[in-house]
Each structure stands twice: as C-alpha cells, then as structure tokens.
Image (cartoon, rainbow, N blue to C red):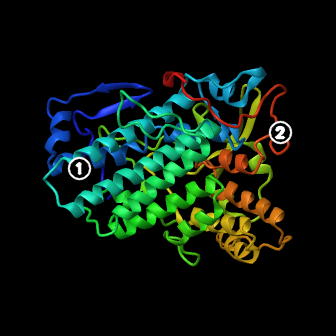
Amino acid sequence: MKTLFLPLLAGGLLFLTGCEIDEQFDPNGPSINSVLSDATKVELDLLVTAIEAGIRNGYAGYVTASGTIARELYIFDADPRNTEDLLGKEDIVLDNNTFYITGPFNSSYRVVKNANILLEAVDNTSSVSEAEKDGYRAFANTMKALVLSRVLDLLGDNGIRVDVADPNNLGPFLSRDESYSALLGLLDEADAQLQGADFGFTLSTGFEGFDTPETFQEFNRALAARIATHGERYDEALTYVNESFLDLDGDLSVGPEMIFSAAAGDLLNPLFKTPGQSGDQIIVHPRIIADTTAGDLRVDEKFRLRQQSTSQDNLNGDYETALYPSATSPIDIIRNEELVLIYAEANINRNDLGTAVEALNVVRNAAGLADYDGEVTQDALIDELLYQRTYSLWSEGHLMFDLRRYGRLNAQFLPIDREGDDIFVQFPIPLAEGV
C-alpha cells in the first residue's frame, strides 16, 4: 500500500507566482507567523509533506511541452497551442504568458517558497535537535535544486532566479553557467548537512530506500550528476554519479518516485492516458517509431499501437503512450538506468571510451539488445548515447535538453512536420517576472 500525501497542506504557507506573493491561511492550520517563530515538529513535518507533494505539480507540462519541441511526442487535446505554439506553426513564437511555461515555472517556485519557509522555520525553532534540523535543511535544499533544475532546463540561456527568499527583494536572473553553479552549490550544501543528520520526518513510500540521511545522500548525488551533465560539466558529473546509487550490475528501475492516488485531495498521474481514446492523448512522434531497433523491449513497454491512427492539425500518429499502466502509477524522479547513462556520457566526454561502451551495453542488454558493435569513437558513441537516452527516458523530460547540449535541436537532426514549423531551443522568461 502506497503512503498517501495529506490532502490539506500546511496552513498559512506562502506560494510564489511570478513576483507576486499571496498568503493563504487555513483556519484549521497554523499561521505563517507561528511556523516562522517557533514551529512545532508537526508543523515542520507538514512543510516536508507539502514540498514532496508539490514536486509533482507542473511536471506533466514540463514533460509534454519539452517533448513536443523535441519531436518525441504530440499532445492531441482541445488546446490548439499544443500543436501550434510548441511546434512553431506558421511563424508562431512561444508565448511568455501561457500554460506551457507559466505552469512548470510557477509550480516549481511554489516548492522553492515552501522550502525557504521550512529553512527559516528550522532556524527559529526549539522543537527538534540540531541533527534533525540539518535533516530538514538537507531535504529542503535538495528539493529546491530538483525543481529549479527543471526551470533551468526550460529557460536555457535565460538562466533562473535562485535567490527568492525575500519576496520584496528577489535576486537577479543568473546566467546559465551561474545557474548551474548555484544549483550544484545547493546540492553540495545539502550533502554537507546530511553528514551526521537525523531524519525526524517521514517521507512517502515513493522514497522507500532513500528515506534515511545516508540513502537520501545518494539521491542528492544522483541529482547533482544529472544537473552537472546538463551543464556539460562532465568531470563533476562523473564524481557525483560515483557517489550516487549508481549500480552497473543492479536493477535499472531502482530510484525514488513521485506517487499518486485516487484519495480525495490527492493527485492522479497526469501523464496516464486511457488507451485508445480519441482526445486528450499523448501520441508518439512517428520518427520515434521509425527509428526503433528490432527486438528492443522498450518499444512494447512504452508505446501502444492504436486500433485506429489519429490526427490533429495535420499531424499524424499510429502509436500512443503506454508508459504508465494506470492513473495511480508512480513516476520516477531519477533511477539507476539514467545514472548508468550519465556515467556513460561522462566517460565519453572524458574520452574513456571503453568504459563508456561497457555502461552503454548495460542499458542495451536490459532492453534485449546485443552489445554495441559500432565504431568506438567519441562521435559514434555520442550518437549511440543519445539513441539509448531517447528510448530509455522517452517522455520523461530529457530529450529536448539532450539534443540542445549537443547542438542537435534543429532541423538538421529533427523533422519539420509541416511547412513553416520551427524548432525552439528554449522557453521565454514568464511575463510576470518583469524582465
């Protein structure tokens, strides 16, 4: 039985939407002043629950908007912006004030705000021990880095705000490189806080196996490895991934998850789609199907052939998502399979090609494919790496950013489905940010 999130989050929490801050008070819950002045352990734990639950919000938009741009999927539903804006139809440009950027952006910064409240509350409470305080701090900083990394993925060279603790004096948008440094700094700070920390709180069963300071530290290092990889810092990525729960001989599915339920007030998996329905469906981009390898087990696991082909806005597809079996299926935050691919990528870029091939073969063999037998050159192995990442991590919010860091987010490498379509490399800063 999966542990469910509480349907009501901690009362009086602050939520960040753009630069506007609104206090939301729950008459049955604590006020923000009581939380910040001398929070009880119950109040601190409610903040932890709010943060863990909050990382699920906006994730579907992050995945489907970036996945559409990367030509790994289409969203066929009632909103034409999914097939117009995101594909640059007839010279349309991305809107800086619509759901595909404001949704992931605002929900991520709500988590950041709750994490900042937790950090301030921990500093001003006498309800828990110093070791437990460090546990709360490490959790808050790690989760801040997780959600901010999603925003940085989307905004690219626009960078992100990291310093938002004071709503009346928000920090600047950092450069892309400064943003990566800041996120890795948050994770390194959390890593140091985990040394000798105690977890006085309980995480959901999505973190089973990663719910002690020692095992959560491996999760923290895994996130650092991902972020360093996205930032093309491959020496750092290799160090981080070796400190994570990477296991070349282990189960590739191991890792913490976001969980969902049908309980009142909780969320269903937003990326689950009823098989065969004519509307509101995630359609596999035809190029993904065309490029599959015979015998690849991931094809049947992730893609379902529709009884009838479907089309919308002059776009067509024969396959739909089969990634999640039900509306309560969990979604991986990060798993061993991705860590193996990060390990391979770091070694490719450090020119340790033999080690990279060994790691790539772990993923190939798990997918039912024979060992790699192509050229062992850096360029050839980058091709192989991107191929394996495409199918191992399909529709999980990776491909747009994988292609971008290798200069392949363009018409040279991706199809233009309709004359006049464009391929975007990043999302705009939301209008509400005033920059």
Given contact means CB atoms under 8 Å apart, are the residues at marks 1 and 2 in contact? no
At 38% from the left and 64% from the top, the residue drawn is 192
At 48% from the left and 64% from the top, the residue drawn is 221
- Identified by mark 1, the residue type is Val
Q: Is residue 330 left or right of residue 7?
A: right
- Residue 218, given in percent of the width and then of the height, sits at 44, 67
Label 2 sits on residue: 411
Residue 165 placement: quadrant: top left
- Residue 380, given in percent of the width and then of the height, sits at 83, 64
Label 1 to label 2: alpha-carbon separation: 50 Å
Say above or below: 96 vs 130: above
- Residue 123, given in percent of the width and then of the height, sits at 23, 49
Task: Please indicate, yes or no, whether residue 211 appears anywhere in the rendered image.
Answer: yes
At 63% from the left and 66% from the top, the residue drawn is 235
Say above or below: 326 vs 66: below
- Identified by mark 2, the residue type is Ala
Q: Which numbered tag is attached to residue 122?
A: 1
At 60% from the left and 68% from the top, the residue drawn is 238
Q: How many marks?
A: 2
Classed neighbour count for the residue bearing mark 2: other residues with Cα under 10 Å, few (<14), some (14–19), many (≥20) = few
Earlier in the chain: of badge 1 and badge 2, it is: 1
The residue nearer to you, when weighing 43 against 53, is 43
